[in-house]
Structures are given as structure tokens and as C-alpha cells.
């Protein structure tokens, strides 16, 4: 386990985000708090009760106004110095300010008054960690018993993990990681486990084992996608793999050469781990996504996933066709996310480098020669372009007109034709002012006409 990277990650955790939910609840109100906006400090202290001041302080804390929260907790304590919870809250505020000296003073006094304040003991444990006194933190954490609160249990395990990382105790780390699985309800635990899983995959990747890395990442990604995308360290690292063009020795030696080549390319495109597929499950996954095409017709995501499976299986030309179909249907805002243009360009270059297998190159794109014939006779010399127009339901004559009007802007031409425009001149005028709305993409089906531009 990469101890130093984990330590850096934990040291950068925001104390406020980690501890806010553990703040004590203020006493319930019997009546609304009087308007105190124009009152002086002395008048507020005189007219408002300790509970009212506590409620004001708690409200400010939830709004992340730490300065105001500190002011009203101090006032509440002035009115009721026997209240150990308010005293502990002052310790929490000092901790959030990184004022560890006062945090230590307030929290120890609160625990002297009431040793059963689990929250205060957890806060004091984090003070010790921030001070670098991890053995002191461990001593406090070991005094905490299991509670009815999943939040407090999760934070206890989290801080124990923090201590184990600081002490570089590998044995304890493995045990606590298992315990943390019981606290995955808490966001900070999920994010920590996601980062640990990322580091595990990163170690495999840097050894050249791409498949194991992708498998580990896929597992944690599927468990917490929001947590994965939220962590900038993960995203930055994955982006860097596209720039470095890492060569994976173990992958190169594996007999599944095509599968590994595709996996490496998808990593460089930033599509791993979301679109990782196990080699042993490709046939089943391909059938699954193909069945979604039958059920949902032109649904673009199913086309994309089916095309990805075809890629992994080495069916590059069939995958190319599916990606073209997907490109014509997917919302414009999603084209960059799915790296469709990059994949299509890569496959086009790949196809150009391959020796001709069919005596007629059009056979690779049109299974029925009679479908290809009008396009050949219509002056089209690129079967890929012809197949794309054919998939959209256009005739060679229509396509030629669009090719002329949208010269050099064929992606825009395909888009406007896909949503129902049939006059390329009119589409050209509209293209200068707006993009195709997502709703129009979603209701398009190949060869169909969704209506006039007024309806769009």
C-alpha cells in the first residue's frame, strides 16, 4: 500500500467537511428566536437564553460562518458554563480554525465534565493527529466504544485508519480497511475507499499490468462513481496517462493482443475505467448490449457500449459502423465526453493501415451489394461517407447536395439531417445560430423525419 500517497491524501482532508455532521444538536425551540439584528453585544447576552444562543451558533456553523458560530457559542457558554456540549463546540470551532492550543483546552475541559462525549473525544483525536501526536490520538480512539450512530462509528474507523497510515502500520491498515466497509454509508469513508482502490490499480499500472489496474479501477468506480469523478488527484493521473503513452509490458506479452491494444487505447482516451470489459465476459456483454439495441431502437448509449464490446473482440470494421451510427444520434454535448471523434479517427486510420481483404472495399461497409451500387454510381468514392449517409436514410442525390453545401463541416451536416432537416441551404443558415437541442437527438430514429424546423 502506498503509505506516503495516502498520508498526503488524508492530510489534505478539510476538517470542516469531515466534522460538520458531528456537531451537537441544539435544544429544540419552544418559540421563535426574537429579532436580535439591531441588538448590541450586551443586549443579546441579556435578552437571549443560552439555548437560543446555541441555536444561532449552530445555524451559523451549518452555513460555514465559523466566525459568527464562534461568537454565539462563546455567548452561550457565558450564560451556562456547566454545559459541557457548548464547551466542546468551542473546541470544535478552534479545531476548524486550526487553533490546536485552544481546541485542546476546550475539549479536555469538556471531557473532564463529561467523559461520555464521544464527539468531543473524536474531535480531540483529530487535534492530536493534526499536531502529529498520533499515539495520543490512538489512545483517545481506543477509549471509544461502538455507538448507535453510524456517523460516529464511521469517523472513529476513519481516524483509526489515519493513525495507522501515520504510524505506517500495514497490519492495522488491512484490518481497519475491512472495518471501513461497514461504514460506507458515510461519504468520507466511500471517498477514502475509492482512493485506496485507485492507488491499488495505479500500482498495478506502473508495473505494466494494465488489465489488473483497469479491473481494480472498474470495481471501485462502479461502487462510487460520484466519488471517483470528484477526486481531482484521480482524474489528473488518468489524464496524464493519455499524455505519457505508457507501454504495458505484461499486456504486450499476453496472447490476447487485440484486447490489450484496445484497452490501452481506451485508457489513453480517458474511457477507462467506465468502459472496461473483462475479456472472459465479452461474448455475454456483447449480446446484452445488442439486445438493448433491439429493445430501444436508436438509443445511442447502447450503440456505444455494443461498439466498445466489438472493439475489444477485434471486430474493428463492425465497431466502426456502430460508432458512426452512435455519432449521428448522440446529443452534441456528449460527443466529446464519449471521445467519439477520436475513436472514429483512430479506427479510420487503423483501417487504412490494414491490407485489403475483400476484393471490393465497399463489401466491408455494405453487406448487400445492391445497397452500395447507387452510391458508387452516384459518384461517391469513400464507402465510409456513403455508409454514414445510408444509415441516416439519405439518398445519394440528397447526400451530394449536403456534401456541397457543408463542405468541410460534415459532422454538422450529419447532425442537421439526422434531426429532420432536408434542405441543406436552410440547415446551413440555421447552423450559424444554434446547435441541435438534446431533445431532438433523443427522438431521432434512422431514416425518420421528426418534423419541420418550426417544431424543432
Image (spheres, helix red, strand yellow):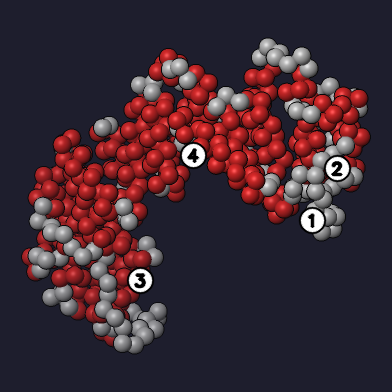
Give the SS element for disc 1.
loop
Q: Nearer the viewer, mark 1 or mark 2?
A: 1
Question: Which residue is found at the position 31% from the left and 76% from the top?
Answer: 55
- The reply to whether discs 3 and 1 touch (Cβ–Cβ < 8 Å) is no
Identify the mark at residue 428; answer none if there is no mark: 2
| Residue identified by numbered label 1 | 456
149 up-or-down from 244: above or below:
below
Gap in angstroms between the C-alphas marked 3 and 1: 47 Å
Q: Nearer the viewer, mark 2 or mark 3?
A: 2
Q: Earlier in the sequence, mark 2 or mark 3?
A: 3
Q: Nearer the viewer, residue 3 or 340?
A: 340
Give the SS element for disc 4.
loop
Q: Earlier in the sequence, mark 1 or mark 2?
A: 2
Answer few, some or many: residues within 10 Å of disc 4's Cα (few below 14, many 20 plus, some between 14 and 19): some
| Residue identified by numbered label 4 | 274
- The reply to whether discs 1 and 2 touch (Cβ–Cβ < 8 Å) is no
Amino acid at each position: 500500500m502506498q503509505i506516503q500517497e495516502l498520508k498526503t491524501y488524508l492530510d489534505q482532508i478539510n476538517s470542516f467537511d469531515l466534522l460538520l455532521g458531528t456537531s451537537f444538536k441544539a435544544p429544540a425551540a419552544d418559540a421563535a428566536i426574537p429579532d436580535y439584528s439591531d441588538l448590541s453585544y450586551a443586549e443579546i447576552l441579556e435578552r437571549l437564553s443560552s439555548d437560543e444562543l446555541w441555536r444561532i451558533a449552530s445555524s451559523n456553523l451549518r452555513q460555514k460562518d465559523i466566525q459568527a458560530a464562534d461568537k454565539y457559542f462563546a455567548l452561550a457558554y457565558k450564560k451556562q458554563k456547566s454545559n459541557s456540549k457548548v464547551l466542546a463546540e468551542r473546541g470544535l470551532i478552534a479545531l476548524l480554525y486550526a487553533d490546536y492550543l485552544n481546541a485542546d483546552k476546550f475539549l479536555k475541559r469538556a471531557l473532564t465534565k463529561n467523559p461520555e462525549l464521544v464527539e468531543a473525544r473524536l474531535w480531540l483525536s483529530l487535534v492530536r493527529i493534526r499536531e502529529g501526536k498520533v499515539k495520543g490520538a490512538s489512545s483517545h480512539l481506543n477509549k471509544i466504544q461502538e455507538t448507535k450512530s453510524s456517523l460516529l462509528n464511521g469517523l472513529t474507523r476513519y481516524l483509526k485508519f489515519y493513525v495507522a497510515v501515520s504510524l505506517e502500520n500495514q497490519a492495522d491498515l488491512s484490518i481497519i480497511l475491512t472495518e471501513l466497509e461497514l461504514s460506507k454509508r458515510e461519504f468520507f469513508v466511500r471517498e477514502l475507499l475509492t482512493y485506496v482502490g485507485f492507488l491499488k490499480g495505479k500500482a498495478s499500472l506502473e508495473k505494466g499490468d494494465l488489465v489488473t489496474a483497469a479491473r481494480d479501477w472498474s470495481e471501485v468506480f462502479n461502487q462510487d462513481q460520484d466519488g471517483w469523478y470528484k477526486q481531482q488527484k484521480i482524474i489528473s493521473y488518468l489524464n496524464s496517462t493519455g499524455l505519457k503513452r505508457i507501454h504495458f509490458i505484461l499486456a504486450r506479452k499476453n496472447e490476447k493482443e487485440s484486447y490489450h491494444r484496445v484497452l490501452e487505447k481506451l485508457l489513453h482516451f480517458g474511457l477507462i475505467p467506465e468502459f472496461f470489459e473483462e475479456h472472459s465476459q465479452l461474448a455475454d456483454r456483447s449480446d446484452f448490449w445488442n439486445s438493448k439495441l433491439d429493445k430501444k431502437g436508436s438509443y445511442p448509449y447502447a450503440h456505444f457500449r455494443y461498439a466498445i464490446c466489438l472493439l475489444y473482440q477485434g471486430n474493428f470494421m463492425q465497431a466502426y459502423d456502430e460508432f458512426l451510427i452512435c455519432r449521428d444520434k448522440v446529443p452534441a454535448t456528449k460527443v466529446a465526453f464519449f471521445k467519439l471523434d477520436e475513436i472514429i479517427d483512430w479506427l479510420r486510420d487503423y483501417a487504412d493501415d490494414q491490407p485489403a481483404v475483400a476484393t471490393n472495399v465497399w463489401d466491408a461497409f455494405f453487406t448487400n451489394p445492391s445497397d452500395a451500387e447507387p452510391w458508387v454510381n452516384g459518384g461517391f468514392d469513400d464507402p465510409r461517407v456513403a455508409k454514414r449517409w445510408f444509415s441516416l436514410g439519405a439518398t445519394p442525390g440528397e447526400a451530394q447536395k449536403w456534401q456541397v453545401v457543408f463542405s468541410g463541416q460534415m459532422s454538422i451536416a450529419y447532425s442537421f439531417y439526422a434531426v429532420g432537416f432536408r434542405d441543406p441551404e436552410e440547415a446551413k443558415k440555421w447552423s450559424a445560430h444554434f446547435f441541435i437541442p438534446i431533445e431532438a437527438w433523443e427522438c431521432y430514429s434512422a431514416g425518420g423525419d421528426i418534423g419541420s424546423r418550426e417544431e424543432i
